[in-house]
Image (tube, rainbow, N blue to C red):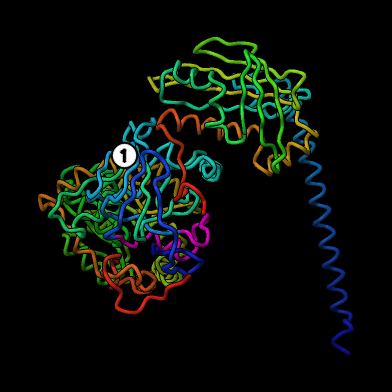
Amino acid sequence: MRALTWHGKHDVRVDTVPDPEIVNPRDAIIEITSTAICGSDLHLYDGVIPGLMGGDILGHEFMGRVVETGPDSSLEKGQRVVVPFTISCGSCFFCKNHQFSACDNSNPVEKQDITENLYGHAMSGLFGYSHLTGGYPGGQAEYVRVPFSDVGPIVVPEGMEDDDVLFLSDILPTGWMAAENCDIKEGDIVAVWGCGPVGLFAIQSALLQGAGRVIAIDHYPHRLELARNLGADVIDFTRTHVLEALMEMSGGHGPDAVIDAVGMEAHGFAPDRWLDVAKQTVGVGADGGHALRQALMAVRKGGRVSIPGVYGGFLDKFPLGALMEKGVQVRSGQTHVQHYINDLLKRIEEGEIDTTFLISHRLSLEDAPLGYRNFHDNQNDWTKVVLKPGLTAPQPSEVEA
Amino acid sequence: MNRLTPNRRQLARGIADNRTYLLVSLAALTGAGALALALNQSRQANDQHPPDDAPGRTGRRSRFGRFAVSGRTVTINRPRQDVYDAWRDMSRLPHFMENVESVTVQGDLTRWTIRGPADFDVELETRIVSDRPGEEIAWRSTENSAVETSGKVMFRDAPAGRGTEVEAVIAYVPPAGRIGQMIAKLFQAEPSIQGRRDLKRLKMLLETGEIATSRNRKTTA
């Protein structure tokens, strides 16, 4: 089959690789019809996530049609499914508690040592996201092997378009959980750092969960426009002093809850530019934790901090004093996709949530490297790239043996 | 020519640099000495502390006489008897013990072929010395064993209906002493690493019916 493979920093290619097979009884094989490039894929593209190996297949947002099932899979051939990016067994302590992204059993044992040493506990398995989380081949391919296929994938009603439901695999539940972690009370003011896909879905979710006002912070004009279209007020941090503005816009109170939808993506997206802009604006040497530090300073006393943004290691100059003295609550974590996916599918079906506004480009799988390059270099206009293996590439593909 | 012969000033700076270097090294050495002394004193102080409630193998001392002791506890979301049964049927152990090539059972004698570091096989013979259904299985090596070892696995009800806590403890005399142990660790066949991986595999098997793998095909082509 054809698949997007990683070969090093800024070097991804579409290669021909062996087709996946059923390996374990609960597996299923899915023929991919749509798969997206995620902001977090850009970390891999930039080579800042350790534990990738040359030839690894990327991609953790995907959906398609079931073509093969193991004896213990609950799926049937021909069903259309969206697959959560988190791999979860459904039967361990964490899955039983609906903390699916903390699954004990999905990361292969020999790969658990790394995160057990790094974080104190082994992480669960994720698709296409380095060997820290299992080294599972991802879904930017024609086919993918889905372990525990009786727990993760959700069957999509016929008649719903791929583009309507694809983002149930990651960013929509991630934005929803980010808002839920804010414990929003009717009328609350919520500030959101970052208007990438997750930030935008967090804005939409916060308003649906009862926020009275959402204030979005970014610097890409087009992304701020998308935020405004969703009903947010926006702050362009290249024009405005963010902390001062947030205080003034919340009656001197401070936002009740804040969401850091930037994470170390601040590095991943456009490292030099972001750092420079941040330094000029705030006047401090900012690293990847800048958004989080600012969010902690901004949040009101006794407020809530939600961190959907990805962090992998350590953060210095963390304003722990602000956290303690203001009595702030912090909630974070990889998304428990399986916990949210049914409810969110229903909301899409009922027209309460639309996700298609985000998609800026639809490309063939063969054009995936082009998608990566532009999503990385031109963030203002390339807001979300969806790859369709069914589309034929407009240019002759460069096939490698 | 002129550039190659250092002038007085450069020479002086060189000496000064050397002196700084010497001072720094001296300070580092003194520091290291002081640290060693402090560590030694704190260790003596610790000997005077009363014993705590932590398992012995988690102590700062890792050797007990000639024996290296390692152990690991995992919680498995299954009833105690099920977990005990899975362990008691010794012939099934190779299913989740990666480095166990084969196990043959004769009465309460078990013969193990274990893949040691660098594909070097180790033959063990153990005898079950204690067997309390649903609670504990303990074994000790016989004189036909290449490595002197004893171990036990204990099964307890986990709190709050979380299933069973399985605690496995293995004591062994490392072949070729400490160096053998370190080399084995390099090849990831050291019992404490192997033990924790094996217990996690047992957990996967009992909780999910399979052992997770990211391999995309049945055979690596």
Q: How many numbered badges does the structure rendering display?
A: 1
In the image, taking residue A16 as reference, residue B141 lies left or right, namely right
Tell me if residue A47 is in the magenta stretch: yes
* Residue under pointer 1: A73
Helix, strand or loop at mark 1: loop
Residue at the location (52% across, 58% down)? A53
Vertical placement of B88 versus A367: above or below?
above
What chain letter is assigned to the residue under label 1?
Answer: A
On the question of residue A64 being in view, the answer is yes
Locate residue B210, reporting x and y percent: 43, 35
Of the pair A370 and B45, the residue shown nearer to us: A370
Residue at the location (37% across, 75% down)? A397
On the question of residue A255 being in view, the answer is no
Crowd band around label 1 with a 10 angstrom C-alpha radius: few (<14), some (14–19), many (20+): some
The amino acid at mark 1 is: Ser
Residue lying furthest bottom: B1
Locate residue A385, reporting x and y percent: 29, 66
Locate residue B34, reporting x and y percent: 79, 41
Q: Over which residues does the magenta segment extend? A: A35-56
Tell me if residue A392 is in the magenta stretch: no
Residue lying furthest left: A350
Of the pair A247 and B82, the residue shown nearer to us: B82
Locate residue A336, reporting x and y percent: 32, 42
Q: What quarter of the picture does the N terminus of chain A occupy? A: bottom left
Residue at the location (60% across, 22% down)? B54
